[in-house]
Image (cartoon, rainbow, N blue to C red):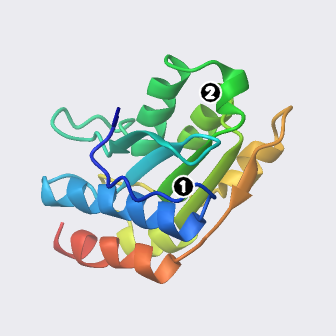
């Protein structure tokens, strides 16, 4: 049974570029629906896409409605930490400190992201809807008591294209 709106073409081996591009498609959909261009998905140990999440800033202007935070809240109430330890969070952009904390507390084992926080900050500037923290998620995870594997930035130029035009016109 499908639990998301993404194609069934996911390979069984974790091809990070493939899954990141699916996360970019979620971010693109968020932007097409009038939201901020952020998207995340959770892949199980066998590559099955378990969940996807667009940015949830709208409609209530929830500043904590980041795609990664929301999907980790959903995941932690759906799956036990032992299972999440074998899962991968794919995010169109590097999880901020809040989202990295959510991934850590939910128990996810790996985070793969496209656009770095540093580069995102350069694109958003001091935009009031995205006061980006230039704090790498690796530094957040390093403060924890368990390991979280981090891979990224990957496909960063591709990820940046989602944000360039969006933040310039907002």
Q: Position of residue 124 (x, y in %)?
A: 37, 68
Query: Which comes sooner in the sequence, label 2 or label 1?
Result: 2
- Mark 2 near mark 1, Cβ–Cβ under 8 Å? no
Quote the CA–CA distance across marks 2 and 1: 21 Å
Residue 117 visible in the current orientation: no
Residue 70 picture location, percent across and down = 41, 33
Task: Return the mark for residue 106.
Answer: 2
Look at 73% across and 23% down and name the residue there.
82
The residue located at (56%, 61%) in the rendering is 113
State the image quarter where residue 16 is shown.
bottom right
What's the residue at 40%, 43% (across, down)? Answer: 67
Q: Which mark is residue 102?
A: none
Q: Is residue 122 above or below residue 83?
A: below
User: Residue at left 81%, top 35%?
Assistant: 144
Q: State whether residue 54 is above or below residue 62.
A: below
Nearer mark to the viewer, of 2 and 1: 2
Q: Which mark is residue 133?
A: 1
Residue at the outermost right position: 145
């Amino acid at each position: 049974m499908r639990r998301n709106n993404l194609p069934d073409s996911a390979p069984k081996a974790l091809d990070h570029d493939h899954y990141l591009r699916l996360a970019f498609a979620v971010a693109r959909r968020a932007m097409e629906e009038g939201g901020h261009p952020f998207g995340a998905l959770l892949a199980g140990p066998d590559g099955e896409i378990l969940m996807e999440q667009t940015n949830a800033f709208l409609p209530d202007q929830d500043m904590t409605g980041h795609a990664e935070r929301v999907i980790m809240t959903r995941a932690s109430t759906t799956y036990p930490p032992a299972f999440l330890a074998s899962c991968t969070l794919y995010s169109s952009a590097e999880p901020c400190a809040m989202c990295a904390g959510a991934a850590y507390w939910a128990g996810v084992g790996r985070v793969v992201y496209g656009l770095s926080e540093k580069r995102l900050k350069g694109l958003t500037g001091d935009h009031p809807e995205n006061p980006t923290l230039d704090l790498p998620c690796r530094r957040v995870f390093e403060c924890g008591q368990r390991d979280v594997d981090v891979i990224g930035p990957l496909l960063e130029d591709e990820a940046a294209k989602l944000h360039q035009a969006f933040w310039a016109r907002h």
